[in-house]
Amino acid sequence: MAGISVIIPTFNRAGRIEKAVESVLAQDFRDFELIVVDDGSEDDTLEILRSYPQVHVLPQKRQGVSAARNHGAAAGSGELIAFLDSDDLWLPSKLTVQADFFANNPEALICQTGETWIRRGKRVNPRNRHEKPSGQVFERSLELCLVSPSAVMMRRSLFDAMGGFDESLPACEDYDLWLRIGCRHPVHLIDEPLVIKHGGHEDQLSAMPGLDRYRIASLVKLLENQPLTASQRAAAAAVMQKKCRIYANGCAKRSRDEEAEFYQAVARHYENGPPQSQTQKENSPP
């Protein structure tokens, strides 16, 4: 039994995985297990991982980052779960600071730390709209994902209760989970930059085109299935309609008329809020 299960999902990251792993092994908090799920890598990632006897390596066929994270969490034994993306790094005190937070706040279920952003090798300052809130994050997180997987630690009981990451989403799976959590529970912020977040490389999921269609799918699912308050429901419907119209306009400009019509219809459907009888399946984007 470990106090914290650290989960790293990875795919074809032979050039980066060593630094991520070593940043975990260098933690001054020692009561952890490190589980790395290799999601069907075709480069030397798996061979590099097997050179670390301290790491529990779980190879799987290519299933996506959600399945990899869920697989790793299911294999772990820690009461607390922390995730690290394989292109990010932790400072040595990251686990200690968050473990202390949970020890001092037994009612807390999830927290995240601050980050230092490195883009294409250069440090950048986040814009004001990227500033992380603390506590009730739901409405601010609808427009833009303000919770980072590499910065999060949560109680296993919460992860299990929420059903983990949605494996049907090839991207924006973190946006989806944080909204499902945030509509019910506060997400606490430890305002220390204990994560070095690297961005700007081509193999990031955030570089995929058309990401808003996955955010729209997440919002539809949220509106249909989650116990939202009236204000949460109104805010989620408004953001979903806005994203639908922007995405539909983009489809129309590219002569994807059928897709544009679909998203326009989804936006109209939620003008007066979602009918309670409508199912997620009937409204899920193609």
Image (cartoon, rainbow, N blue to C red):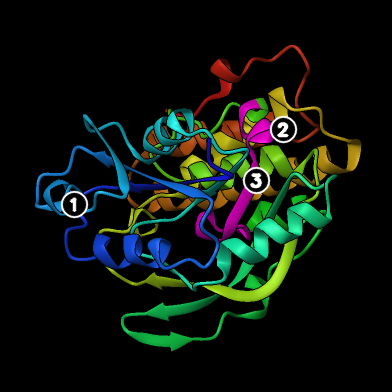
Counting other residues with Cα less than 10 Å from the Cα at mark 3, is it few (<14), some (14-19), or many (20 or more)?
A: many
Q: Secondary structure at mark 3?
A: strand
Label 2: state its secondary structure: loop
Could you say where residue 231 lies in the image, as x and y percent from the top left? 89, 43
Name the secondary structure under disc 1.
loop
Tell me what residue is drawn at x 31 percent, y 50 percent: 54
Relative to 164, say whether 205 is above or below.
below
Mark 3–mark 2 CB contact (< 8 Å):
no
For image coordinates 41% across by 35% down, the residue present is 72
Quick one: label 2, few (<14), some, or many (20+) residues within 10 Å? some
Residue underneath mark 1: 12
Where in the figure is residue 172, as x and y percent of width and height? 48, 46
Q: Which residue is mark 3?
A: 154
Answer left or right for 143 relative to 139.
left
Which residues fall within the magenta stretch?
144-160
The reply to whether callout 2 and callout 1 are in contact (CB within 8 Å) is no
* Closer-to-camera residue (58/77): 77
Asked whether residue 267 is drawn in magenta, I would say no
- The mark closer to the camera, 3 or 2, is 3
Q: Examine the structure image and report whether residue 152 is included in the region drawn in magenta.
A: yes
